[in-house]
Amino acid sequence: MTELLLHKRKIESVFNLLGEHENHITYSVSWALAQSPRFLSAFLHEVLGPRADFSKVLIRLQHVERGAGITDIEIESPGEFFVIVEAKRGWNLPTIKQLETYARRPSFTSSTKITRRLVVLSECSREYALHYLEMKEVGGVCVAPLSWKTIAALANKAQGGASHAEKRLLRELLAYLRGLMTMQKHDSNWVYVVSLGGGTPKGWRISWVDIIKKKSRYFHPVGGTWPKEPPNYIAFRYGGKLQSIHHLEGAKVFTNPHEEFNEIPSDRWGPHFLYTLGPVFRPTHEVPMGNIYPNGRVWCMLDTLFTSKTISQARDLSKQRDKED
C-alpha cells in the first residue's frame, strides 16, 4: 500500500490528519461515537452501566456556558442521562476546580433527576486517576476515570457485529489511538539525562546502578520537578560522565516499591513512573558531565550527546536549537 507522509511523519489513520493535540483527539473520538452506534453503546455501558435505550443521544463538542467553562464533550439523552467528558493527552489530569466548574454548569445541575457522570479520559489508570483527584465524586456527581487503553478496548470490542462502515471507522480510530497510548512523542529526539547516586540507599538491598544494569528499570516521581509524561529517551550519568542512553519500551505508575522490587521495603509513596528500559547505546567517545550540578537533570537532543564534548555542551546546543525553531 502507498505510504502517506505529512512533514516526514507516516499517516496511519485519517484521524492523524487532524493532529494529535487534545482537541484533535476529542474530535476524533466524538466523531467515532457519533458514527458508530455499537461504539457509543459500549462507551455508555462502561460509563453508566447497562441501559435499555441509547438511541436518542445528542453529542456536543466544545460547549460554552457563561462562567462555567468549555466542556470537551457532552453526551446527553434528555430525561435519561447527561455525561460530561474531559479528555487529556498523556498523564495530565484536570484540576478539582475544573471538575467543580463543570459540575455547577446550569445545564448539568438542572438535570439532577437523571443519571449524571463526569468522565475523565487520559493515559492514567483508574487507580492512579482516583489517587490524584482524591475524590470519587464532585458536587454529588460521580467521577469516572477512563484510560485511552480502555477506550481502545471498547472500540475493538465494538467491531463485533458492527456494519462494514463502522468497522472501517473503528479500525481507523484504533490505529490513531495506538499512536497516542504510548505516552511518548515518537518523533521526539529529546533525551532526559538524570544523575544516579552512588551506593545503596538505606534499607534497600539494591543500588540505583543495579536497578538500571540488572533490572533494566528506572523510576521517579510523577510531576513536581520531574516529567509529567514519560520521555522518549532517558540517559544516565554517574562517575562524572554519561554512562548509557535507552529508549523507553514501557511505563507504568506505582505507589509501593516493594511490589515492583523485592529488594526495596514496602512503603506508601506518591505516584511514581516505572520505566522499562530498552538496550543500552552510547557515544563511542567519553562524554563528561561538564558544567552541571552534581544532582542536576537536563534535557538534550539525542544527536548532541554524540557530537558534543560534554553533557552541558549538549544541553546548551539543544536549548539554542530549540529557540531557533
Image (cartoon, grey):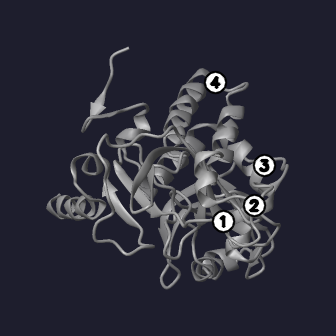
Give the x, y percent position of residue 54. 74, 47
Q: Is the C-beta separation of discs 2 and 1 under 8 Å? A: yes
The vertical placement of 161 against 309, above or below, is above
Q: Is the C-beta separation of discs 3 and 2 under 8 Å? A: no
Closer to the chain start, of discs 2 and 1, is: 1
Label 3 is placed on what type of residue? His
Left or right: 225 in relation to 148: left
Residue reaching furthest top? Answer: 1
Query: In whole angstroms, how far apart are the C-alphas of marks 1 and 3?
Result: 49 Å
Query: In whole angstroms, how far apart are the C-alphas of marks 1 and 4?
Result: 59 Å
Mark 4 packing: few (<14 Cα in 10 Å), some, or many (20+)? few
Label 2 secondary element: loop
Closer to the chain start, of discs 1 and 4, is: 4
User: Badge 1 is on which residue?
Assistant: 200
Query: In whole angstroms, how far apart are the C-alphas of marks 2 and 1?
Result: 7 Å
Query: In whole angstroms, how far apart are the C-alphas of marks 3 and 2?
Result: 46 Å
Mark 2 packing: few (<14 Cα in 10 Å), some, or many (20+)? few
